[in-house]
Amino acid sequence: MLIIWILFLSAGIIFYLIYPQKFTAERIASFMNRFSSHLLVGYLIISILRGITLIPSTPFVFAGVLLFPDQPLLVLTISIIAIGCSTTFIYFFSHLLNLEKAIGKMYPQDKLQKKLNSPLGVFFVFLWSFFPVVPTDAVSFAAGAIKMNFTKFILAVLSGELIICSFYVFMGREFFSWIF
C-alpha cells in the first residue's frame, strides 16, 4: 500500500514539473466545477477508506474545507460518516490483529474492560475522540479488543468527533478564506 501511495505521489510531482501550466488556479477551479459531483463522491469514498490505512482524519477534513468551501455542513456530515465507518471497521476487526495480547501486556485486560465498560468509560472515549493530538483509531482498537458495548462506544466517538470536526470545518473555513 505504501509503495502504491509513493508511486502515485511521485507521478503527481513529475506531472506537475513537466506541465506546470496545467496547475494554475483557473484550471484547477475549472476542473473542480466540471467534476464537482464526482469530487464529492470521491471525497466521500476516500474519507471512508482512510480508516483502513490508519491515516488521521484531520487532513481529510481540511481537504474537504478546501474543496467545498461553500458547503461546510456537507463536509462536516461526510467527515462524521467517514469517521463512523472507519471507527466501526477498526472496532469490529481489531481481533484480527491480536490486540488483546498486546493490550493485556500493557494493561490487564479485565481492568481495562471494567474501565471502558463503566459509565466513565464512555466519558473517556468521548474525551479521547475530542482531543486532537491522540488518534481515535487507538481507542477503537482497544474498545474492540475488550468488547466494549458498541452502541455506547460509537455514540461517544461520534459525539467527540462532531465537536472537533465542527471546529476544524468552521474555523478552517475562516482560516483558509483569510489566507486565500
Image: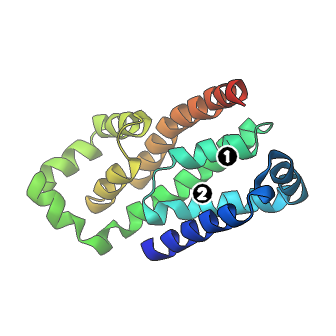
Q: Is residue 1 above or below residue 86?
A: below
Q: Secondary structure at mark 2?
A: helix
Residue shown at 45% from the left, 65% from the top: 53
Question: What's the residue type where badge 1 is placed?
Answer: Gly
Q: Which mark is residue 56?
A: none
Q: CA distance from mark 2 to mark 1?
A: 9 Å
Q: Is residue 77 above or below residue 104?
A: above
Assess whether mark 1 and mark 2 are in contact (beta carbons under 8 angstroms). Answer: yes
Q: Position of residue 96 (x, y in %)?
A: 31, 74
Question: What's the residue type where badge 2 is placed?
Answer: Ser
- Left or right: 35 as drawn, with respect to 95: right
Give the mark, 2 or 1, whose residue is nearer the N terminus: 2
Residue shown at 50% from the left, 39% from the top: 161
- Left or right: 98 as drawn, with respect to 44: left
| Residue 58 in sight from this viewpoint | yes
Q: Which mark is residue 64?
A: 1
